[in-house]
Amino acid sequence: MTGRFAISTGDTLAVDGGAHTRDPLEFHRKLPGYRPTPLLTAPSLATSLGVAEVLVKDESSRLGLPAFKILGASWAAYRAVVDRLGGEIEPWSTVAELAERVTSLKPFKLAAATDGNHGRAVARMAALMGFDADIYVPAGTAQARVDGIDSEGASCTVVDGNYDDAIARSAKEAGERCLVISDTSWPGYVDIPTWVIEGYGSILWEVEDQLAERGDATPDIVVVQMGVGALAAAVCGHYRRADAPSRPRLLGVEPLSADCILESVEAGEITTIDSAQDSIMAGLNCGTPSLLAWPLVSTAIDVYVAVDDDRAREGMRQLASAGVVAGETGAAGLAGLIELTQSADAEPARKALGLDESSRVLVLSTEGATDPEAYEQIVGRPQQAVASSSVPTT
Ligand SMILES: Cc1ncc(COP(=O)(O)O)c(C=O)c1O
């Protein structure tokens, strides 16, 4: 089993993370079923990894969906729709009221490309606002993920190609009666992915509030999995904002077969990779970093690691033993941390992160069992059995 590492050469702690407000969190609080996701302490993981504490932010159930992505999709769709209506709508306090405020746009739809989670989240948000949704997925997307999108009442089209091809296909839908809600950006397409990143920030504000409630400090190291890098940009922005109480070191994790950020960092510029992008970490099967995420992820992350699928499986099992249901992509962050603690080649990377037995590490478990059959095969138990074994969390 081999991982690949890159260590930042710049002063990552000095990076200016830009503005970072709680507005998206205020918005999310008005969505049906909102509550902060659990932040749990996993002593068994800390022991097996040889660190002082492992904190896990468990995104397996977020606003009724099995991944964190609805945080970005909902805020971006909302902001884009308000923008389409001229920049302002009457105040609202429930989603039913919001749907009334935006009804003049109908017939209207939202379109998106996805490897599963983002598209399902866009479809959910479209339905909440009373719009249609067209979602495009790459060839080979697991049927369970397609079914998840269908279950939101969206039309789901399998594109003959990879994630980048699905993006290109969805972008063609943009028009007077359709907004494309993409989580990645390209020249001329910046506002919506900016709002997606802002929306992801709610995870980090919740962590901050949950730690403050317990009287705990910011962790020393934060681990984030990276597809196009939008979630990682939210992490960088949050922990490098001017008034951050402290600045943890950051570890970014990708699959070996889709390590477009690591490759780009090594090349010193955004690079599209031509590998298969066929990892079981489906949410991370991306070939090109987001243009918008790039300035932050290329400067604020201390160590980049690429891991193989066996590490992701190991991460899923270890999270399951701590009572957390994490799908392949959800466990990728922990997989990166395992790689760093286990690999003989990782000493320079551990040093760059300051990773040792005194470290307190935050891992984002970004999805639940989005492919339940594969989950049971890998973990050896169905997700329900893992969830019911879960230890008390806050
Ligand atoms: C569960 C999960 N985690 C992490 C990511 C990575 O997010 P990003 O593409 O913003 O890097 C994704 C992307 O789809 C995802 O679905």
Image: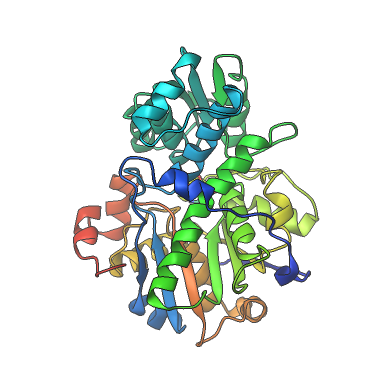
Q: Is residue 242 left or right of residue 253?
A: right
The residue most toward the bottom is 357
Q: Which x, y percent locates residue 24? A: 51, 46
Residue 366 occupies quadrant: bottom left
Q: Which x, y percent locates residue 382? A: 22, 54
Q: Is residue 141 left or right of residue 23?
A: left
The residue most toward the top is 107
Q: Is residue 172 left or right of residue 379?
A: right
Judging depth in this view, the residue of 110 and 47 nearest the camera is 110
- The residue depicted at 52 percent of the width and 25 percent of the height is 111
Residue 390 occupies quadrant: bottom left
Number of marks: 0
Residue 215 occupies quadrant: bottom left
Q: Which x, y percent locates residue 349? A: 65, 75
Quadrant for the C terminus in the image:
bottom left
Q: Is residue 207 left or right of residue 269?
A: left
Q: Is residue 268 visible?
A: yes
- The residue depicted at 24 percent of the width and 69 percent of the height is 392
Q: How is the image coloured?
A: rainbow
Q: Is residue 284 visible?
A: no
Q: Which x, y percent locates residue 216? A: 44, 78
- The residue depicted at 56 percent of the width and 23 percent of the height is 179
Q: Is residue 343 above or below residue 195?
A: below
- The residue depicted at 61 percent of the width and 76 percent of the height is 346
